[in-house]
């Protein structure tokens, strides 16, 4: 019960909507994780068929598909549904994934066996509609922006946006004591998911402005040195 209470409190800290712990128990993400814990134990004991039956039942009830082979740490929170997590995915502690996200794998017919899905570090936020593909590693406290597609390793604390995803120069999650930012928003603490595309465009404009300022400074530096000489 203590672990369950801690888990529900961790969700409440990331989601302002619920009014009680009991309300959180109605969340599809909570039920999907509970079913996965059972399916994963069966999978590890090589009861593959039973594990798959529980997996399919969970997907039917919650619209969340977590392969029984996926390894998931503590306090994992799926906000809403329609999330897909592949067989060899590994997820750390206190990870948050929003609706429509995918932790996908490489095709098994490419000759690469074994690890095909991502490894997600502690405290990572994967935004709505984002995809992390292949055996890449997403570092701790990184944020994957809405609709981004990650195909390469992500550094700790980085903020990734775009297709293919690339890091922004906007301050990310480098500080371990930074408070949780809903939706992995890179630019603003006040963020409405309905305006996510505008927000990401604003991030891009800020990035280009900072790069332009850096280039201008670099161009003007020789002129200033020549004037002093």
Image: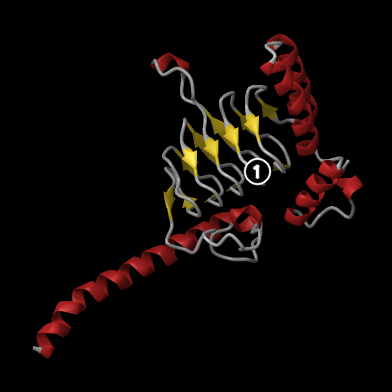
Secondary element at image label 1: loop
- Give the residue pinned by disc 1: 93
Q: Is residue 154 left or right of residue 49?
A: left
Q: Look at 11% across and 88% down and name the residue there.
A: 227
Does any portion of residue 191 appear in the rendered image?
A: yes
* Res 210 quadrant in image: bottom left
* Residue reaching furthest to the bottom: 228
- Are there few (<14), some (14-19), or many (20+) residues within 10 Å of tag 1? some
Q: Is residue 209 left or right of residue 134?
A: left
Position of 111 relative to 207 (above/below): above
In percent of width and height, residue 8 lies at 82, 47
Q: Look at 61% across and 49% down and name the residue there.
A: 123
Name the foreground residue: 78 vs 161. Answer: 78
In percent of width and height, residue 4 lies at 84, 42
Name the foreground residue: 106 vs 136. Answer: 136
In percent of width and height, residue 211 lies at 33, 66
Image mark count: 1
Which quadrant: the C terminus?
bottom left
């Amino acid at each position: 019960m203590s672990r369950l209470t801690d888990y529900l409190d961790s969700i409440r800290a990331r989601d302002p909507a619920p009014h009680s712990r009991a309300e959180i128990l109605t969340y599809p993400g909570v039920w999907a994780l509970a079913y996965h814990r059972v399916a994963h134990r069966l999978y590890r004991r090589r009861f593959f068929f039973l594990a798959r039956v529980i997996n399919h039942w969970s997907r039917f009830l919650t619209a969340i598909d977590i392969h029984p082979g996926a390894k998931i740490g503590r306090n994992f929170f799926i906000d809403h549904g329609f999330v897909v997590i592949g067989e060899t995915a590994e997820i750390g502690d206190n990870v948050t994934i929003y609706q429509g996200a995918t932790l996908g794998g490489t095709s098994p017919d490419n000759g690469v066996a074994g690890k095909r899905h991502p490894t997600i570090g502690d405290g990572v936020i994967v935004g709505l509609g984002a995809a992390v593909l292949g055996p890449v590693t997403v570092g701790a406290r990184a944020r994957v922006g809405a609709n981004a597609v990650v195909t390469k390793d992500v550094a700790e604390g980085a903020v990734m946006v775009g297709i293919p995803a690339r890091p922004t120069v906007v301050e990310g999650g480098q500080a371990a004591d930074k408070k949780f930012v809903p939706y992995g928003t890179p630019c603003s603490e006040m963020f409405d998911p309905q305006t996510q595309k505008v927000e990401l465009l604003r991030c891009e404009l800020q990035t280009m402005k900072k790069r332009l300022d850096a280039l201008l400074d670099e161009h003007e530096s020789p002129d200033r040195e020549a004037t002093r000489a």
